[in-house]
Image (cartoon, rainbow, N blue to C red):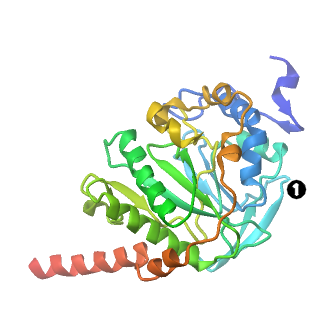
């Protein structure tokens, strides 16, 4: 093996021929090669966004890393963000260049989860996001059908979005925003989910509690505020190392989520950037959508209260 193969852009690369994780069907070299091949597509969607990564170290379970470790090179861009939930500052990386991306790859960072806001404007999400999660054992076609419900609900509110595989079994719909709305984005997301559910309640559900979904596709409207989401082109820690792959709406019936992996995606891209090419122009949120959303309880809070109510009921019955 030539020495120059073990360093790229000044980043030493180690243990490249080790399996990425048990059952991956891919090596660390495959991860590095893939991320390097798509760097001109994935770096723009990560740039200037506080980044969490999912790493898989040998002999350990996967874990999400938010805080940069102390051994991080000085040249890795970074930013501090106040975390309200834990009441502390978190030192996030900013993956703004190839060198940083390669460093993360060498750290066995498989998944890349940027925030919905940039460091230049931490109060205004750049996108409204709907995460479509089919039921256990449900096929990809269910997610596709649910995505079309979301698209109809968006169109009825004068909005349009881009779609990509989640890299798991579902789909993500992204609606680019004009940078004006703040907490209204979360409300609008809840309203889009509710409207999509009403279009076909036998197919889709907004039920946050898993046991209440009854085999339907979950329309997850919680990806807002300080949330992060797997980036377009990000690999995922799953057998075969699938990637989150952008699609046109017309392509959804002709593919499965397993078609797109670190092995297959670069050739399928064929020099294109379908995420950038398919993303509509930034849009203003519909006032009616926002107003409806503010009448819908926040899912996590409602689920917490319902869980407590059910626990009290079980104790009473017992």
Q: Quadrant of residue 211?
A: bottom left
Classify 171 as above or below 34.
below
Residue 30, x across and y down, in percent: 66, 28
Q: Residue at x 69, y 67 (%)?
A: 117
Task: Determine if residue 34 is in view.
Answer: yes
Give the vertical position of 56 relative to 84 (above or below). Answer: above
Comparing 72 with 128, the one in front is 128
| Dot 1 crowding, Cα within 10 Å, few <14, some 14–19, many 20+ | few
Please, is residue 269 above or below residue 150 in the view?
Answer: above
Residue identified by numbered label 1: 74
Q: Quadrant of the N terminus?
A: top right
Q: Position of residue 160 (x, y in %)?
A: 57, 57
Give the SS element for disc 1: loop
User: Residue 182, located in which quarter of the rendered image?
Assistant: bottom right
* View extreme (left): residue: 317
**x, y (%) of residue 75?**
88, 53
The residue that appears at 47% across and 64% down in the rendered structure is 156
Residue at left 59%, top 59%? 175
Q: Quadrant of the C terminus?
A: bottom left
Residue for point 80% across, 62% down: 78
Q: Is residue 205 visible?
A: no
Residue 190, position in %: x, y?
45, 71
Frontmost residue, 18 versus 202? 202
224 to the left or right of 38: left
């Amino acid at each position: 093996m030539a020495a120059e193969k073990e360093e790229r852009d000044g980043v030493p690369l180690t243990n490249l021929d080790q399996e990425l994780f048990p059952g991956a069907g891919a090596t660390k070299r495959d991860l590095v090669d893939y991320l390097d091949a798509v760097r001109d597509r994935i770096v723009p969607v990560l740039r200037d966004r506080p980044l969490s990564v999912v790493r898989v170290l040998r002999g350990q379970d996967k874990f999400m890393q938010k805080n940069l470790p102390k051994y991080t090179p000085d040249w890795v861009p970074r930013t501090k963000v106040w975390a309200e939930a834990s009441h502390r500052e978190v030192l996030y990386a900013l993956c703004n260049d190839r060198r940083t991306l390669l460093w993360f790859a060498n750290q066995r960072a498989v998944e890349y989860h940027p925030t919905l806001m940039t460091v230049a404007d931490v109060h205004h999400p750049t996108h409204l996001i709907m995460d479509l999660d089919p039921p256990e054992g449900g096929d990809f076609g269910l997610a596709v059908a649910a995505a079309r419900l979301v698209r109809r609900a968006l169109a009825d509110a004068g909005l349009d979005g881009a779609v990509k595989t989640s890299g798991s079994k579902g789909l993500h719909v992204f609606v680019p925003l004009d940078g004006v709305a703040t907490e209204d984005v979360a409300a609008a997301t809840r309203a889009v989910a509710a409207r999509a559910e009403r279009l076909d309640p036998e197919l889709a559900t907004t039920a946050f509690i898993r046991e209440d979904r009854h085999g339907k596709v979950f329309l997850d409207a919680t990806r807002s505020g300080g949330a992060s989401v797997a980036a377009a082109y990000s690999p995922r820690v799953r057998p075969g190392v699938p990637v989150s792959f952008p699609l046109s709406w017309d392509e959804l019936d002709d593919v499965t989520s397993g078609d797109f992996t670190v092995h297959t995606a670069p050739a399928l891209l064929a020099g294109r950037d379908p995420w950038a090419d398919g993303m509509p122009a930034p849009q203003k949120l519909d006032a009616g959508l926002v107003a409806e959303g503010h009448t819908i309880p926040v899912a996590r809070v409602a689920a917490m209260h319902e869980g407590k109510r059910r626990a009290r009921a079980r104790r009473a019955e017992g």
